[in-house]
Image: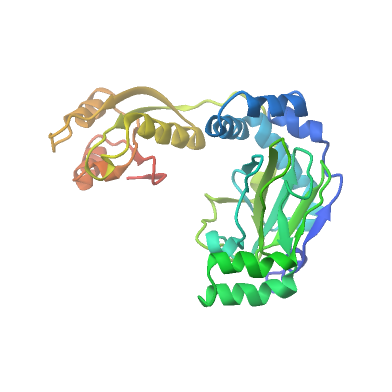
Amino acid sequence: MLSTSVLHPLLSRSTVINDLFSIQEAYDALNVQNLDDLFLLCDSANKSETLTSLYKRLRTVNFLSFYRSLLGRLEHVIGTDYYFQALPTIRIQWPSERAGTLHIDSWVGHGSSTINFWLPITPLDDTCTVWLSDSFHASDIITSMELGLISLQELEVIAKPYMRPARVELGSILTFNNSIIHGSYPSQNHRPRISLDFRICVPPYRIGIKKLGTDYLPAIQSKPIQTQPNIKKPALTVIYSTGLAAHLSHATQRAIIYDFCAANNFEPVYECSEYYNTPHYPKIHDLLKSNQGLPIILATSAAYSDINYIRSLALSFQTQIFDAFANKEI
């Protein structure tokens, strides 16, 4: 186990870990045959549909097994005392576009004990890759930004002379810490760049706004998972476009519910919409009465003016009611 009094060496430097996996492993995990098949997926749908399709593949047992296998192969450099990001992020840098502006991860909620792991799954060139600053110059720029002395636009100009493109071969992983300015510049490649990234959190576990146990899982759970049938829990779902959620269409609320179900192992078996202008929520009451024991998933509690009444219903019928948007039980 790593000592909590000694900082992990990867917190003080960036490096490339070469030849950690074969790129075909990544393609198999994403259920594509090869690089051409992956590009075909990008060409056959719009940008939003492509990203949605890829994220669905990240949630499969096949991909999660690959991900956890990667973590196991990394333990010779990360040790065994860590938490890992529950689900990696997949990013697409489209031709002529950026995949992200310059930033450090603490500005988007990650703590100082996190280490980034970035792996491309399509070939790179100097315009379609992630760019990183050196830590020496980054320190003063970050301080100026956090003191409000420079704007985002000024940050881009000041940091640019110190940014360098990451050159990472397929099958290798780039690691860098939370104090490295990184981002991308408009791609001049005619093909999209697709990459995966994830983070681990090491002692002393400064996690930022993220949560251990949900956003990050303990290392013991990084062991390869069995490809046994996944038995999902049946659940009832309710959509309701009113109140503070009046601007959310049924389709949008349904998408929120489905994402929650996928992440929490639920299977929607029945959907309804609550009646409008009925503060006693008769549809929810009827669902609870006629389907005792089955949990109910609401798209968002913001649609309901009396959430305490809904809590009381859940207690009365001894079942669970979840807020999908907040990702928690009501």
User: Residue 317 versus residue 203: which sits nearer the camera?
Assistant: 203
Q: Position of residue 284 (x, y in %)?
A: 23, 31
Scheme by which the image is coloured? rainbow
If the image is split into quadrants, where does the C terminus sit? top left
Q: Position of residue 62 (x, y in %)?
A: 67, 29
Q: Is residue 283 visible?
A: yes
Displayed quadrant of residue 43: top right
Give the residue drawn at x 86%, y 49%: 18
With 314 as the anchor, is 137 left or right in this view?
Answer: right
User: Residue 248 versus residue 94: which sits nearer the camera?
Assistant: 94
With 285 as the anchor, is 38 left or right in this view?
Answer: right
User: Residue 151 versus residue 62: which sits nearer the camera?
Assistant: 151
Q: Position of residue 320 (x, y in %)?
A: 33, 38
| Residue 32 to residue 152: above or below | above
Q: Position of residue 322 (x, y in %)?
A: 35, 40
Displayed quadrant of residue 141: bottom right
Give the residue drawn at x 28%, y 45%: 302
